[in-house]
Image (tube, rainbow, N blue to C red):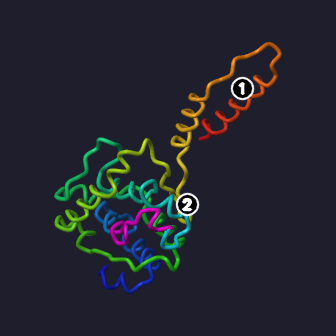
Amino acid sequence: MTAEQVEQMAPLAAIRTLSSTYPSPTNAQAIAALDSFAAVTADQAIADGVREDVARSFYGPDGVLPRMRLLAWGWTNPGDLLRPPSDRKWWQAAYGRPLWNVLETLFSQLGDNAQPLQWDAQEAAGDEAELSRSYAAVVADDLPPVNEAPCPRYLIPPGRGQMPIPNPECLRKPAREIAEKIPMPRRKQGDAGWLLLLLIFGAMYIGKGDKR
């Protein structure tokens, strides 16, 4: 599919056309799709009029898009190395994560805030020079904040129309840390308030910490 054809379409229509053209995208096609629109931060997106929950859950530093881009580069956990642009076997392999459903959901939410896609057919084909340019951007912009995050705040949603899912593992950690730092009062004989406070803390821990 040519860049001119994609750029002439409305963004949502372009995503749908790309998804039908490449129903099982390779890692190179996933990178081309994720590079086809501006990789703004959540704060920048909000300033441009994007709804806050959409911006926070999709864009960096905590949203799913930076991680989706890194996954296409072979990065899963801190310490992993990115695949080199010269690794043709990797770039022709299947992406293996939801891609088009996530992007269709995003562009459905963006509406008039979405800009035309800039599709790079050479990058989608795994061209080493084009991937090298993307490599520099992902190392500078996407990797540092994701490496520093204690856990992903949002999980990649599998279905069309589904917003990114808050990660229960990431929610559980702050709840436990807060509970551990709160000094429990000494129990006094006949002190019903102590027992009530203990029950409240227990309910908070169960409610916030053990949901899956």
Q: Residues within 10 Å of mark 1 (few under 14, many from 20)?
A: some
What residue is shown with label 1? 198
Q: Residue at x 27, y 61 (%)?
A: 137
What residue is shown with label 2? 163
Q: Label 1 near label 2: C-beta < 8 Å? A: no
Toward which corner of the image does residue 44 lie, by quadrant?
Answer: bottom left
Q: Residue at x 36, y 83 (%)?
A: 7
Please state which amino acid type lies under the numbered disc 2: Met
Residue 178 % position (x, y): 57, 34
Q: Residues within 10 Å of mark 2 (few under 14, many from 20)?
A: many
On the rendered structure, is 11 left or right of 86? right
Q: Is residue 137 magenta?
A: no
Residue 14 % position (x, y): 42, 78
Task: Provide the residue span drawn in magenta.
Answer: 33-46
Pick whichever, 43 or 114, lies toward us.
43
| Quadrant in which the N terminus appears | bottom left
| Quadrant in which the C terminus appears | top right
- Separation of residues labelled 2 and 1 (CA atoms): 36 Å
- Using the image, determine if residue 115 lies above or below residue 140: below
Mark 1 secondary-structure assignment: helix
Q: Residue at x 72, y 26 (%)?
A: 198
